[in-house]
Amino acid sequence: MADRPLTLMAVHAHPDDEATGTGGVLARYAAEGIRTVLVTCTDGACGDGPGGVKPGEEGHDPAAVAALRRTELEASCRVLGVDHLELLEYGDSGMMGWAANDAPGSFWGTPVAEGAARLAELLHRYRPDVVVTYDENGFYGHPDHIQAHRITMAALELVPDVTSKVYWTTAPHSAMKRFFAAMQEFGTDWDEQAGESAGPDAGPDGGAPELPPIGLPDEEVTTWVDTHAFGGQKYDALAAHASQGENIFFLRMGRERFTELMGTETFVRVRDTTGAALPEQDLFAGLR
């Protein structure tokens, strides 16, 4: 390890995902001199267009949305101090059940082996000590998040001797209760928030499909990383994705309340070669 820097790689599905679940650790570890690499798998073309226009509505130009979201993603990376941004540029698959799931080039429709081979090239190039992605449910059942999980775990099998620690993002149930309470306080709820992202193919009621259980009991969370000192950067990184502001509930809180609620990022450690004791407060415990 003496000939290369300690490296964190985060594998995410869409532009803006990097800020929500890992903005704190990306900013914290960049500040500590650790090399940070962000892999974004899709182009985000199923996001909102100008004025909040939804996919399938008049005025929604997927190519223009993708171009704008790339610019916003690059701005977010600058805020968080990300050293390297890698774009796989698969087509955004939309929510589960959308026609976009089966569109040519969609991430959801891409063979896992193909995506894994491309990601394995990046693992070989950057040789990350720590890799972070989603759990097998993509945290909340989004097809592109699930696919990001699948290609990441498959890629790690193709490059088995590089990465020392692998984590899945999660949320403890205690934090989810506080989050839902905050949503109600600010005049929204989970169903409404999910429905804001729903397009014409989302379902008979216009909302997203029923979601799987979210988060884990507190005692099953292995890793709690304090990122309060970087809450402002995390908030600003989310704000960089201005075109999706209607769907980013957190921006309604303001920096102080946001940092209070989102200042600890939590993970499940699923692979480890260091023997670092659990629970832990550092993704790089045992590596430095």
Image (tube, rainbow, N blue to C red):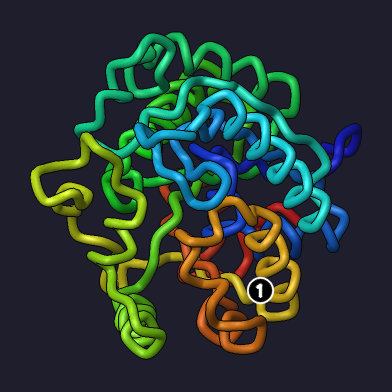
Foreground pick, 236 / 214: 236
Residue type beneath disc 1: Thr
In the image, residue 115 lies at what x, y percent?
Answer: 48, 16
- Quarter occupied by the C terminus: bottom right
Residue at x 45% of width, y 45% of height = 53
Residue at x 55% of width, y 60% of height = 245
Whether residue 218 is visible to the viewer of this picture, yes or no, is: no
Instruction: Name which quarter of the figure residue 179 lies in.
Output: bottom left
Q: Which residue is mark 1?
A: 227
The single residue placed furthest to the left in the displayed view is 204
In the image, residue 24 lies at what x, y percent?
Answer: 66, 65
- Quarter occupied by the N terminus: top right
Instruction: Name which quarter of the figure residue 142 lies in.
Output: top left
- Packing grade of label 1 (10 A; few <14, some 14-19, many >=20) is many
Residue 19 to residue 191: above or below: above
At mark 1, the secondary structure is loop
Residue at x 38% of width, y 9% of height = 104
Please give left or right for residue 133 compared with residue 220 in the image.
Answer: right
Residue at x 73% of width, y 52% of height = 76
In the image, residue 219 lies at what x, y percent?
Answer: 31, 74
